[in-house]
Every structure is written in C-alpha cells, then in structure tokens.
Image (cartoon, grey):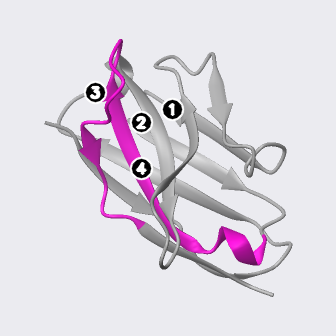
C-alpha cells in the first residue's frame, strides 16, 4: 500500500505560481510512475503530467506544457508539480497518483489539494 498526501494548493492570482508536493508513505515510490491529475467543478478528472520512476522522462497534457514541471525526489519519497503562469482555467482539485511500472492503471490516489486561480 502507498499513501499519498498532497499539499501546496491555495489561492493565487492569474500569472502566479504554486508548487504542489505529494508525500508518499508505506512503500518507496522508486517502482512507481507518478502522476498528477486535476478535476475542475463539473468536469471529469483529467491528466496533467506524469514522470518515470527515475525522473528521466516526463509527459504533459497540452494544457500544462511550457508552464508546469513535474519532478520527483525518490530519497524523500516525494513528487512535485511546479506550476507557473497560472490561469483561471487551472482552478481545480489536484491529485497525486502512483502507478506500478509496466501497468496502465493508477492504483493509489491522494485526497487532493485545491488550487484556485483568480482572474
């Protein structure tokens, strides 16, 4: 079992930045691909970014490219999402998730952290 706890959300003005953190416990995350997702009010949850087990590769949703950066520190069992140039449409609950290597389904999810961007 892996427990995930997100933090770092809050209220920020458009154009501002936030850094989300996802602290994992229970097992080392070195054998997991880690991802960030978000869900805006009235919308389905959507993929934001994910990063390989060793941090060598990352993928982003088009909406996040050039503005968001995902990173991980396996020594601290933590994953980050640096968000710059925030827009009102980035307002959502952001979730961290863990996926076992060589699988496609995310098995573990955090409870989420609210990000609100005021325009």
At x 51%, y 32%, the residue is: 73
- Tell me the tag on residue 85: none
Q: Is residue 85 left or right of residue 10?
A: right
Q: Which residue is mark 2?
A: 76
SS for callout 4 = strand
36 in relation to 77, above or below: below
Q: Nearer the viewer, mark 2 or mark 4?
A: 4
Q: Dot 2: few (<14), some (14–19), or many (≥20) neighbours within 10 Å?
A: few
Q: Which residue is mark 1?
A: 73
Quarter location, residue 49: top right
SS for callout 3 = loop
Q: Is residue 48 left or right of residue 99?
A: right
Is 95 one of the magenta-colored residues?
Answer: yes
Q: Which residue is mark 4?
A: 96
Q: Dot 4: few (<14), some (14–19), or many (≥20) neighbours within 10 Å?
A: many
Q: Residue furthest left?
A: 1
Q: Which residue is mark 3?
A: 28
Quarter location, residue 99: top left
Q: Dot 3: few (<14), some (14–19), or many (≥20) neighbours within 10 Å?
A: some
Percent across and percent down for residue 75 are 42, 28
Q: CA distance from mark 3 to mark 2?
A: 9 Å
SS for callout 2 = loop
SS for callout 1 = strand
Q: Disc 1 vs disc 2: Cβ atoms closer than 8 Å?
A: yes
Q: Residue furthest bottom?
A: 119
Is 100 one of the magenta-colored residues?
Answer: yes
Closer-to-camera residue (25/101): 101
**Disc with the residue nearer the chain's start (3 vs 2):** 3
């Amino acid at each position: 079992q892996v427990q995930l706890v997100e933090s770092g959300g809050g209220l920020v003005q458009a154009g501002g930045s936030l850094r989300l953190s996802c602290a994992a416990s229970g097992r080392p995350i070195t054998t997991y691909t880690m991802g960030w997702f978000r869900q805006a009010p009235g919308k389905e949850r959507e993929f934001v970014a994910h990063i390989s087990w060793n941090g060598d590769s990352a993928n982003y949703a088009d909406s996040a490219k050039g503005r968001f950066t995902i990173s991980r520190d396996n020594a601290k069992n933590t994953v980050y999402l640096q968000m710059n140039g925030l827009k009102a449409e980035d307002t959502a609950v952001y979730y961290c998730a863990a996926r076992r290597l060589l699988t496609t389904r995310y098995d573990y999810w955090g409870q989420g952290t609210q990000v609100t961007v005021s325009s």
